[in-house]
Image (cartoon, rainbow, N blue to C red):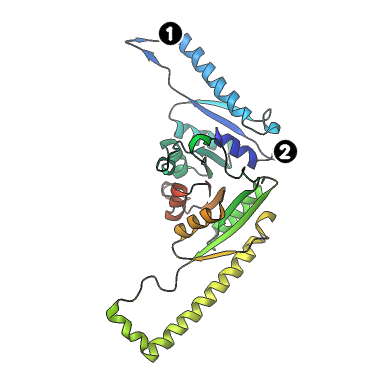
Amino acid sequence: MATVSFVGRLLSVVRDELILAYVAPPLPFVGDDHLDPAVATRAQGALSSAVFDEAVLRLPNEWQSKAQRVELSGAPGVQLLKLADERGADMIAVGFRGTGLFERFLLGSVSRAVVHSARVSVLVVKTAGGPDSEKLAGTADGIFRALVAYDGSEFGDRITALASKLSWPERSRGWAITVVPPMFVHQLPKWLQPIQRDPDVQAMAEAWQKEHDQQLAQAVDDVKTYQEELPEMFRPTEPIVAQGHPAEQILATIARQKIDLAIVGSRGHAAIERLLVGSTSARVVQEAPCSVLIAR
């Protein structure tokens, strides 16, 4: 249900269309005999109605009479993907089931199937866990925090288009981050360290340092320029330029800024490539404590 609440905050009732999809469980059996089909059908209908009614109550008031209900049967992941294709959906929202410190970082089979196989963007909604697991991040102080990961590729345009389509909560604040490789990945071994005193090696190191400083400065300028293409909430903040492994730096920024929604790109787009989410986006989806939107 947290997925419904989260999505309802990011869509415009004037511009968007919201479909609530529920995959009904298979009809039960009792003992060696089949349960009366009529009884099973009525029970299943009552369950579906209860699920939809509760989901609608989790939506903002303006959405409660507008959201469509679609009941499906069969393999959940397959049916959700099929429905998204049939309805021309721009985004599929799925949730995490786990709430423990370890379980929260494990995608369920349905979510995993959608994340890896969808042709469109996928929003993976996570809750805070614990007794208040239905409580969405960002409600404590009323500020909704978003982070966009920018890598200078064509995915920047896709993320911009997606972020511009969302209806951000009134009190929202956004950051943009890019990650550049560190100047030196590893320290020199002890036996090689004496050459650092060689004048020629020092000159080369200084040249590398100058080039690296220029790269960092250029990255700052690139992110500032990119922020101007994003919604207004992203523009006042200072660009974040980190050095290191992209996934690690994105996850560290998510923790530091208490992000509620991270938007990352996925490099898979062809039929085969969609089965492999990029290593950075896959790790962010898996390990981030916040919700993650994978832009495609």
Residue furthest to the bottom in view is 199
Q: Are marks 1 and 2 in contact (CB under 8 Å)?
A: no
Mark 1 or 2, nearer chain start? 2
**Residue 49, image x and y in percent?**
57, 20
Seen at 42% across and 43% down, the residue is 101
**In the rendered view, would you say 54 is above or below 204?**
above
**Residue 163, image x and y in percent?**
62, 50
Q: Amino acid at mark 1?
A: Asp
Q: Nearer the viewer, residue 280 or 193?
A: 193
Circle 1 SS class: loop
Seen at 36% across and 90% down, the residue is 198
On the question of residue 238 being in view, the answer is: yes
Q: Decide: few, some or many residues near mark 2? Use Cα within 10 Å; few <14, some 14-19, many ≥20.
A: few
Left or right: 75 in relation to 54: left
Seen at 47% across and 40% down, the residue is 114
- Cα separation between marks 1 and 2: 44 Å
On the question of residue 231 being in view, the answer is: no
Left or right: 207 in relation to 61: left
Q: Nearer the viewer, residue 84 or 252?
A: 252
Q: Amino acid at mark 2?
A: Val
Residue on which disc 2 sits: 14
Seen at 58% across and 31% down, the residue is 20
Quarter assignment of residue 232: bottom right
Circle 2 SS class: loop
**What count of labels does the image hold?**
2
Q: Decide: few, some or many residues near mark 1? Use Cα within 10 Å; few <14, some 14-19, many ≥20.
A: few
**Residue 173, image x and y in percent?**
65, 53
Disc assigned to residue 36: 1
Q: Quadrant of the N terminus?
A: top right
Residue furthest to the left in view is 191
**Residue 52, image x and y in percent?**
58, 25
